[in-house]
Amino acid sequence: MLLPEEPTAQAHLLSWERRLLLEELASISLALGREMAPPAASGAASEPLPLSQTDRPDRNALVSPWERLRLLHALWPRLDAALEMRERHPDSGIVRQSRLTPLPHTRGDAELARKIACTPDGQKAWLERNARPKNALSPPETARLPENRPLPTPDTLANRFVVTLLQTLEAEANALASLARFCAEEAEAERMQTVRGGAQRRLRSETLRGLRPLTAAERSLLPAAAPPLRYAPPYRLLFQAWLTLDAPLRFDWAHLPLLRLPSVESWRLYEIWCFLRTAAALRASGWQVVDGDALRYEANGLRLCLQTGRASRLRFLPASIRSAPARTASAGDASPLLELFYQPLFPSANRRLANRTTDAEDAPILSLTHAMQPDIALRFRGRLFLLDPKYRTYATPDEGPKEADARHEESALQTDIDKMHAYRDSLVRSGQRVVDSAWCLFPGSAERTKTIVAYPSGVTEQPFGTAGIGALRLRPGEAPDLLASLITHWLETQERR
């Protein structure tokens, strides 16, 4: 039985490190997407990706939020149609307001009788009412009394929700337009100004003008506190759009306009970042991506498509032969093609495969024990090199603040290294081992700690040891040179064989 990990086993990213991590997710994806861009039509110039971003941004670089901009632009026509429908059939409530009412038109309730009997104005109005000629068409102007009357009002939770939605859209469209101009994307800036102008126009409508937005407490009660958001068609559409805009993919405008994934756990985000960092290390080592399904072009732009339980792949060729056609790598193949997988699944050898083959080159890679799924795998000339991100510090007793916690961290390191042994020794093709090396990636702590855990301990000539097992520190804000060196060491060793 697997017990949950203790909190001391987890690492922690500082706020600026998390922002930098998110920025690198966008910039690395963009750099890979540029290389994978489909060829332009004959005679047409190649269309650049819409993000104005350098391949290697510094910490203060800005990332134009293309996906968010496109989302707002795509949603606005539907929002505008729903808002038009809402104006024709707005939600309304009842409020009691005091109005000066001509005496004949009053309701004659107990409150009116009290005012007539107890106030000079009431007695005067009563006398004037009785003294006027019977054939008078209207009562005298002075014969009016204040009376509470129920009146319709647009000040409802549903309408105040619409105000909140429109104010949010207006502010975000304005920020996106400013950022798009900074990134020299004038067409996108104009699209966002259109959305901003439409939101402002709708806010000036008669049934929304002057209404205050929802408070945080009122937002938490939606939609239960406002039935129209569930049942009335225009309000229901607007609330669905609100949920879409508030989905996990959002942008944090507090410090820098950076991508934010609030619903993704830090350890999961670290895994994704390590995968893209590995791709960036390959590019730094002279490889270029040629295709793959981890990144996909869609009508709205470039999308990162990493799927858990189903391997996502990028394929690379050396930059010197980038124009050569890609071929599928297999065991024993001399092709320079290199494949990078995200969470490939290797089934158990006990499982009966429907299409089992006896051809050694086409035989599947299996686990001798149970099914295994490392986070990152490189396949080059039929051999596998594995990387498994672990969101840990791996503190040792003389580095950690508390000896007990440090012992737990050291134990976590041993457990993870044992898992790397299992990867290396259990994955086979036709009974032969296919894994050359299996290493952990870990962020460590904010203070500088160990950078390499190699077996046997690394020396100047062999910093990564000779066992093919180890752990490498990889943390946002620190140079990823060690990862590039480890990958280069792997590939050069494979080339010499």
Image (tube, rainbow, N blue to C red):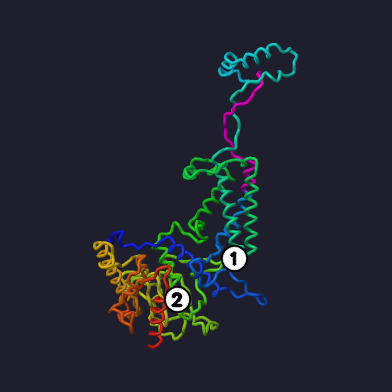
For label 1, the residue is 183
Secondary structure of residue under mark 2: helix
Q: Secondary structure at mark 1?
A: loop
- Amino acid marked by disc 2: Ala
Percent coordinates x, y for residue 297 in the rendering: 56, 68
* Residue sitting nearer the eye, 30 or 404: 404
Tell whether position 131 is magenta.
Answer: no
Mark 1 or 2: in front is 1
Q: Would you say residue 359 is visible in this rendering? A: no
Q: Is residue 120 above or below residue 41?
A: above
Q: Position of residue 273 (x, y in %)?
A: 44, 67
Q: Amino acid at mark 1?
A: Cys
Q: Could you tell which of marks 1 and 2 lies nearer the N-terminus?
A: 1
Horizontal side of residue 460 vs 157, given as left or right: left
In this rendering, would 15 be left or right of 166? left
Tell me the tag on residue 281: 2
Q: Is residue 467 visible?
A: yes
Q: Quadrant of the C terminus?
A: bottom left
Q: Quadrant of residue 361?
A: bottom left
**Mark 1 Cα-neighbour bin, 10 Å: few <14, some 14–19, many ≥20:** some
Circle 2 Cα neighbour tier, 10 Å, few/some/many (<14 / 14–19 / ≥20):
many
Vertical position of residue 239 compared to residue 11: above or below: above
Residue 162 vs 106, above or below: the answer is: below
Quadrant housing residue 411: bottom left
| Span shown in magenta | 82-104
Image-based side of 77 in relation to 335, left or right: right
Count up the numbered dots: 2
State the CA–CA distance, disc 1 to disc 2. 26 Å
Where does the image place residue 430, in percent across and percent down from the top left?
A: 35, 80
Q: Farthest residue to the bottom: give it.
A: 496
For the point 58% across and 68% down, the residue is 52
The N terminus: image quadrant: bottom left
